[in-house]
Image (tube, helix red, strand yellow):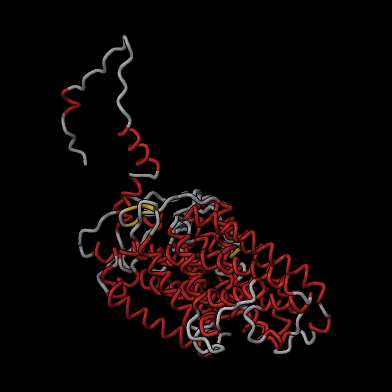
Amino acid sequence: MLDKGASTAVTADAKRAPLPTAGFGARLMRRKPVERLVAEGGQGEGGTLRRSLGMWQLTMISIGATLGTGIFVVLGTAVPKAGPAVVISFVIAGLTALFSALSYAELAGTIPVSGSSYSYAYATMGEAVAWICGWCLILEYGVSVAAVAVGWGQYLNELLEGTTGVTIPTWMANPPGVDGGVFNLPALLVVLLCMAFLLGGAKESARANAIMVGVKIVALLLFCAVAFTGIRAGNYAPFMPLGLGGVSAAGASLFFSYIGFDAASTAGEEAKDPKKDLPKAIMLSLLIVTALYVLVAAVAVGALPWKKFEGSEAALAGIMKDVTGQSFWAVLLAAGAVIAIASVVLTVLYGQTRILFAMSRDGLVPKSFAKVSKKGVPVANTVIVSLFCGVLAAAVPLGQLADATSIGTLFAFALVNVAVIVLRFTRPTMKRSFRVPLSGVRIPFGDTTVPLAPVFPAIGCALCVYMMTSLDVVTWEVFGSWMVVGLVVYFAYGMRSSRLAREAAGEPVADVTEAAQEAPEAAPKAAAKTAQAPAKAPAKGAKPAAKPSARSRKPSNRK
């Protein structure tokens, strides 16, 4: 649904101008205009990202980052909190994600850039809030990669045991403190494997991800078909043994399984038609993922008593083995899980690198994260992030990682909902390729009518805050410590080195906005092709080209 109002034209000077920076508070609140964010899309240090992703590829990225995490890995930790009512936990988490997804869809179509919610906050709430959001995204994405990679080794062991009879020793298949683990080597290996795919380019990575997504969907549907024969009605009773609090706690833990559509929004600068395709990809992927999550969870808790899920990080493979009495089906599912979890690692790792790319371009993190190779890949960024996440996955237990990711995700989503509300009031006439439903309805008020406040974003924000309160005290302590460290980094480095701060201080800063406007993607290729082509000889009998007049040969004074 398009906004009927026309957007106001903004000059290049206006795009460069930050808010007044006389006071400390104003410096924290300086915003980056939407037009400038969009104009800088794809521009990095020494190169540009390539627009090569269509709607289905974006949808596959979103599904790839989402589908598999909450089912293949975290189900073993969520079911003991809620019992069979974990099905409701998935619905609650899905509804919470839906309200936020609507906000993401509107902003992704309006501000199609790599920074995702970080960039949305920069355009609406100012630099300090944007930094906090970006810092949360670093926690959300980086820790999510590690959390998923931890469970990958469990399914790899299931696969190896069923095919070769040999398993990875427990000391190198588990993180420290878990079943005698010392260093989770498989977790590190899957991250490094995904790093190799990302270094090949966004289009190539998207192709590999699409294949893996197809495999994981088939694997989950196969599980449902086989495990359905083992459902026992008694396994659903009592349905809610730990009460509503347990359902909420499980939903909060599972929420990090829904960060996939956020990953799709980070591809805004590599999408062919982001304003049209991103909103569609976000909503379609959320619908597919939620339906599969609820279906698989319902079948799983019906086939296995909920108390037996405790401590199992490969629960689905175990259910297949118990139901059929044969190892073949468990091995088949384990193979699908190995591919599925690798897909999650690949796409979430991709999202993390693109967020740091956007933050680096704004000067808030070192510029090495914005350096782009000739293939359109931020190589240094990808390598640094992959090594960090790989080591984290190998050294930290899964449960702690999942909860830390959930609170970072919820906080970032809450800010996105607020950003929609702020942008509606500050830029009401801006054209939007998608609008959150009902927010444009006008209601009677006295002798006139007033626009209905963006209700859905407000609900989405409230739900995110509610689910954050369901997380335990330790998770809040970790989150608070992370925020303190982030603020120290911002005031010590980001606040002074940001591009807007340097421009306000009169320092010379390379203007990537003009480069983005004056050199569209096709222009350099066409110019290079023209320059390399040999000049054609004039046709026989053709008149020679007229020589330029003296007036036209004079140098122009225009800049």
| Residue 454 coordinates in the image, percent (x, y) | 56, 66
State the count of labels: 0
On screen, residue 329 above or below 203: below
Horizontally, residue 437 falls left or right of residue 500, namely right
Q: State the residue at coordinates (36%, 82%).
A: 485
| Residue 267 coordinates in the image, percent (x, y) | 48, 58
On screen, residue 70 above or below 41: below
Query: Do we see residue 453 in this rendering?
Result: no
| Residue 430 coordinates in the image, percent (x, y) | 47, 54
| Residue 479 coordinates in the image, percent (x, y) | 46, 83
The residue nearer to you, when weighing 301 against 523, is: 301
Query: Do we see residue 361 in this rendering?
Result: yes
Q: State the residue at coordinates (30%, 64%).
A: 367
The residue nearer to you, when weighing 88 against 222, is: 222
The residue nearer to you, when weighing 219 against 250, is: 219
Horizontally, residue 558 falls left or right of residue 286, namely left
